[in-house]
Image (tube, grey):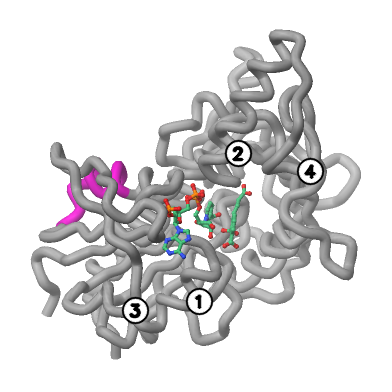
Amino acid sequence: MAKMKYRVAVAGATGAVGREMLKVLEQRDFPLSELVPLASSRSAGTTVPFRGAEVLVREMGEDSFEGLDLALFSAGGEASKRFAPFAARSGCVVVDNSNAWRMDPGVPLVVPEVNPQDLDGHKGIIANPNCSTIQMVVVLKPIHDRARIRRVVVSTYQAVSGTGQKAIAELEEQVRRLMNGMEVTPKVYPHQIAFNCLPQIDVFLDNAYTREEMKMVNETRKIMGDDSIRVTATAVRVPVFYGHSESVNIETEKELTPAEARVLLAKSPGITVVDYPDKKAYPLAIDAAGEDDVFVGRIRADETIVNGLNMWIVSDNIRKGAALNTIQIAETLIARDLVRVP
Ligand code: NAP
Ligand code: 3JN
């Protein structure tokens, strides 16, 4: 029997994603009876704003989750690996934003518009995918159901907020210094990010792809429940504060015209189609920032193959890409009466 209200921890409550989670919990009037903001010893004792009050931040420890129902984690992979099992063991269901559990075969990796059924049978930890994957699969899912996707070629244009608070500050500072004729010394990124594009997100792997790129490949297949979909990705950091953009090329088994794709996507959950080239209207990061939907436009035929589409997909990486998707997972758990650890 589902409870009416839940005691919820936000682990990483002082970070870029954690702060957005608090906002989303407020905005969606999440059925919450108690909020427990957790962070490291660095921020313990400070406060975060929630529902008109300042709530004390506590240091996350092994016993932080006793008596709680849900823990929404965005404190990085290391903290998640260490603390999420303690939460689950004390009966608190974890929705985790890091890479730590995503490819674990026993952990559902969920985007509620795509694979909510994967939550059934969870064992206490649920993973939230990478932001670039989330916005792409929201669009791929209806296309796959209609026309069977064979191959996806994606290039991303990712905002600095994806790297956290320090990266937001770095872009601001570099822009200010360069506009005043001063030199800059990159700290967060390997190169200057202001007025530049960096074709490296996260570390390089043995196959010459970056870890961010391989997250998109592997997570897409797991979420879509289809290992036959071939995905290749190039992930690029751009000097944008909020909103990831993606150029996506899709090859399908069956024909789907751009007009049919527009109609299909416009009626699919979580998607807004903005595709009026004659009016110069297409999705833009600055318009998507602060919004919940995934925006898609520039839908057109790939004239070099038989069944191919090109499109431009944009979404707020901190909202749908992280905080909002996490809270939508929690809401789906509630709706399916799954807020319990078996
Ligand atoms: P951030 O702005 O740097 O914030 C990090 C947060 O984690 C802070 O609240 C920090 O607390 C806390 N923290 C760090 N180490 C901790 C520890 N050992 N114990 C408890 N709390 C700890 O980073 P962010 O952008 O919010 O991202 C946080 C994490 O979310 C990332 O590392 C990543 O795993 C995940 N994320 C996922 C996506 C996605 O694609 N779905 C996107 C962005 C981020 P202090 O204030 O005490 O330092
Ligand atoms: O760089 C981006 O735009 C997205 C970043 C995601 C991220 C950043 C630090 C650690 C992740 C993630 O969620 O994939 C992680 C992580 O793997 O935990």
- What residue is shown at x 68% (from left), y 63% (from top)? 215
The amino acid at mark 3 is Glu
- Tell me how far mark 3 sits from mark 1, CA to CA: 12 Å
Q: Which residue is mark 3?
A: 62
Q: Earlier in the sequence, mark 3 or mark 1?
A: 3
- Tell me how far mark 2 sits from mark 3, CA to CA: 29 Å
Q: Earlier in the sequence, mark 4 or mark 3?
A: 3
Dominant secondary structure, magenta: helix
- What residue is shown at x 44% (from left), y 67% (from top)? 96
Q: Which residue is mark 2?
A: 167
Q: Earlier in the sequence, mark 2 or mark 3?
A: 3
Part of the protein shown in magenta: 22-31
Q: Viewer-proximal residue, 31 or 9?
A: 9
Circle 3/circle 1 CB separation < 8 Å? no
Local crowd size for mark 2, using a 10 Å CA cut-off: few (<14), some (14–19), many (≥20):
some
Q: Earlier in the sequence, mark 2 or mark 1?
A: 1
Q: Earlier in the sequence, mark 1 or mark 4?
A: 1
Residue 148, visible in the rendered structure? yes
- Tell me how far mark 2 sits from mark 1, CA to CA: 24 Å
